[in-house]
Amino acid sequence: MYRFRSVWRLPRSREDLWDEIESLIRSQNPVPWWGAVTAVASRPDGYDLVARSCVGYRLRFTLHDLDLDRPTAMTFRSRGAWWGRRHSPSPTTGPTGRA
């Protein structure tokens, strides 16, 4: 099992971040910040994605069962080369009201 954790400091309010997430999910490219990953199909139940490595291999996987619980969290599942469940809690805001 692998666990990845990252902390992002973004100069936006929590509401602005959720607006952007919802906009991206409705788009044809839900992961524009993830340069090695391309959305190859969009369906009502999820996205088919391909992750390309710099050494030539490709990982194909599907994100599905997306659940947005604004403003609390985002949860989804994946199957294929990458499988599992991801729960991303919403950022907390600091004293300035920023995430």
Image (cartoon, rainbow, N blue to C red):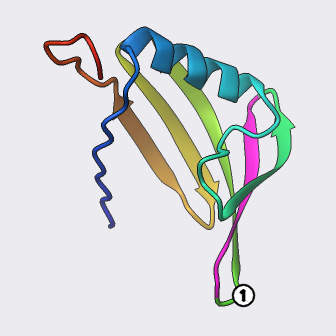
Vertically, is 75 above or below 60? Answer: above
Vertically, is 47 above or below 60? Answer: above
Looking at the rendered structure, the kind of residue marked 1 is Gly
* Quadrant in the rendering for residue 37: bottom right
Residue located 64% across and 37% down the image: 64
Vertically, is 22 above or below 57? Answer: above
**Quadrant position of the N terminus in the picture:** bottom left
- Residue 36 in picture, x, y percent from top left: 65, 65
- Residue 3 in picture, x, y percent from top left: 30, 60
How many residues crowd mark 1 within 10 Å: few (<14), some (14–19), many (20+)? few
* Quadrant in the rendering for residue 49: bottom right
Residue located 83% across and 34% down the image: 43
Q: Secondary structure at mark 1?
A: loop
Name the side, left or right, on which 81 lies relative to 28.
left
Name the side, left or right, on which 76 lies relative to 43.
left
Residue located 53% across and 22% down the image: 67
* Residue that lies at the very extreme toward the bottom in this rendered image: 55
* Region of the chain picked out in magenta, as a range: 45-54
Q: Read off the residue under disc 1.
A: 56
- Residue 61 in picture, x, y percent from top left: 68, 58
Name the side, left or right, on which 75 lies relative to 6.
right
